[in-house]
């Protein structure tokens, strides 16, 4: 039994790049592209699209910008079995960075936004739509969004955009099954003509579990990355998700092959995955940035108990 | 909000010992004991109890036998805030290995059994009960038990024993939320006067998630280990479980402290946790022994795709 409406989006390069400033070689990205393309995955997010006016290409690798030209270098002559796209952040991309869809190898563009920027996200999504791409909106840090504001934002998206899907993004890795169930229902209730998706983080070893729970409640768009690569605790692992989905179109073997060929070595050079500091920010519903900073401090990176005390000790004054 | 009926059992030493033949020093076990004793955890399983007629003490460490004398060396003069116990396997312990409870520092003994040995497990549980201990039964490899046989076994346990709790043991790490829900209900329906517990494995990164799902459906006895230590993919991590349970009696900090003091170093010497070979045996509902053997083969330990092919290729003949 499988649900044919389910679509999987691989975000390996886009989300993994948050760890190393998108400094992946074209050779590595080509290997990932070939594996994902063989696996039956529906969408592949190749990186972020951003303006070089805000990011220095000497510091940031090619997948911070993901030009159409770079994407063509990856595809070469390979027949593409999936839709390709990029993510854009509010205020970090200019209208001219997005060529008309018919001139681009890309099919979709996802807008990442916080709830307070929803009007800007809608404007950007509509610009993307007007250029001929499929558009998506990812609402980040969902576990800190007020429910009133969230419903209002979803209703705006419903009435003012043509987006294909709106994604629940558990940026802090705070959610568990019941909160996922609640959010999927709330999204469904407010998005009568759009799909609901999920992008889950693994701070509490619940990235895959929460994705399953979203599926059970009807979410059809699922984000995952090979080996769970992604900033901090990382994401729902693509290999677990494909093995869970029973659609015979999916093939696990190319993902396992590229895991052993590329990701074992990469994990020795850059760090991601479940570690206690990320668990602590997750259970406290905090952004992982302070845990990421701790992991970069050789003297304190494994001082878990002290980090927990610091994070949970009330400030000297409790005045509001 | 918390449920006061919930009891947590730490199995760190007992289950962790499956990796290193229970060769933990008394100093290490003392550190774990002190941390667990401070954390508010209800039960601590100190090791297996077994007969030296079947296991050579030159090969197996003290926690394969867990004599009352060794347990007293761990406790010293520390006031014990929890119940202490051991696990026994069918046929690997003799009646004389179990002293009367009033002469022992132990409070409980858990019988681990496969479904086909349930009559032997009941006999052993009743012997334990007659010696004055709390008795428990853990049904291993639950994902391969036939439902008819399982219901019959549970009804026998219900009518023929005084066990406190019967545990669902997902030895292969095959279950996900819906199968956990189903099993908890099936156990509850057949065990009107006993508690239901869960011991979850992490082959699919679902050890903690499945424990949450068992809690949601009414399971009150929960197994976990510090850092998830345990054979193969390991178990539900105690640090995640305690942070999830809102009972103020639980304290996370001693567990985080012993994690950094003991388990970071231990993980450099022995291996456990989510790895692709364990995922593969988990999704195929197989015992992890073949994945454990692969991990011990330096040439092939990371040949994931080949391992998957071997495990999924039908034998040359498909005759039944």
Image (spheres, coloured by chain):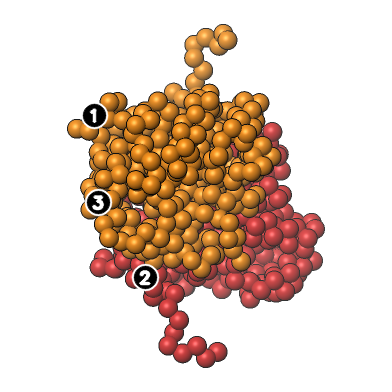
Chain colours: A red, B orange
Q: Which residue is mark 1?
A: B56
**Residue A312 location, x and y as percent?**
44, 74
Q: Quadrant of the N terminus of chain B?
A: bottom right
Residue at x-position 50% and y-position 46%: B207
Q: Check the image and name the residue furthest to the left.
A: B58
Q: Kindly identify which chain the residue marked by label 1 belongs to.
A: B
Q: Which residue is mark 3?
A: B73
Q: Kindly identify which chain the residue marked by label 3 belongs to.
A: B
Q: Is residue A228 above or below residue A253?
A: below
Count of labels in the image = 3
Please tell me how crowded label 2 is: few (under 14), some (14-19), or many (20+) other residues with Cα within 10 Å.
many
Q: Is residue A28 left or right of residue A250?
A: left
Q: Quadrant of the C terminus of chain B?
A: top right
Label 2 residue SS: helix
In 3D space, how far apart are the residues under numbered discs 3 and 2 (Cα atoms)? 32 Å
**Residue A258 location, x and y as percent?**
42, 39
Q: Kindly identify which chain the residue marked by label 2 belongs to.
A: A
Q: Are the residues flagged by discs 3 and 1 from a single subunit? A: yes
Task: Judge depth for marks 2 and 1 and give the one in front.
Answer: 1
Query: Could you say which disc has been placed on residue A307 in the image?
Result: 2
Residue at x-position 39% and y-position 53%: B226
Q: Is residue A312 visible?
A: yes
Residue at x-position 22% and y-position 33%: B57
Label 1 residue SS: loop
Residue at x-position 63% and y-position 71%: A145
In 3D space, how far apart are the residues under numbered discs 3 and 1 (Cα atoms)? 21 Å
Task: Judge depth for marks 3 and 2 and give the one in front.
Answer: 3
**Residue A214 location, x and y as percent?**
65, 51
Task: Judge depth for marks 3 and 1 and give the one in front.
Answer: 3
């Amino acid at each position: 039994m499988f649900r044919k409406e389910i679509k999987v989006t691989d975000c390996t390069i886009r989300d993994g790049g948050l760890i190393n400033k998108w400094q992946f070689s074209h050779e590595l990205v080509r290997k990932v592209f070939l594996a994902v393309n063989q696996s039956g995955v529906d969408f592949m997010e190749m990186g972020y699209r951003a303006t070089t006016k805000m990011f220095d290409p000497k510091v940031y690798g090619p997948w911070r910008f993901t030009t159409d030209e770079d994407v063509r270098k990856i595809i070469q002559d390979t027949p593409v079995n999936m839709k390709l796209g990029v993510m854009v952040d509010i205020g970090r991309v200019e209208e001219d960075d997005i060529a008309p869809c018919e001139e681009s190898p890309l099919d979709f563009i996802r807008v990442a936004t916080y709830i307070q920027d929803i009007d800007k996200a809608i404007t950007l999504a509509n610009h993307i739509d007007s250029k001929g791409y499929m558009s998506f909106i990812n609402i980040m840090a969902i576990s800190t969004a007020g429910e009133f504001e969230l419903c209002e934002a979803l209703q705006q998206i419903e009435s003012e955009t043509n987006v294909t899907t709106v994604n629940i993004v558990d940026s802090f890795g705070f959610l568990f099954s019941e909160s996922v169930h609640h959010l999927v229902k709330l999204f469904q209730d407010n998005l009568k003509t759009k799909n609901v998706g999920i992008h889950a983080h693994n701070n509490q070893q619940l990235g895959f579990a929460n994705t399953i729970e979203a599926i059970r409640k009807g979410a059809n768009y699922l984000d995952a990355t090979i080996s769970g690569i992604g900033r901090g605790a990382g994401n729902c692992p693509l290999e677990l998700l494909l093995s869970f989905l029973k659609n015979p179109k999916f093939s696990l073997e190319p993902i396992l092959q590229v895991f052993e060929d590329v990701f074992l070595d990469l994990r020795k050079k850059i760090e991601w995955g479940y570690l206690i500091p990320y668990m602590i920010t997750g259970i406290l519903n905090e952004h992982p940035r302070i845990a990421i900073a701790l992991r970069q401090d050789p003297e304190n990176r494994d001082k878990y108990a002290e980090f927990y005390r610091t994070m949970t000790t009330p400030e000297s004054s409790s005045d509001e």
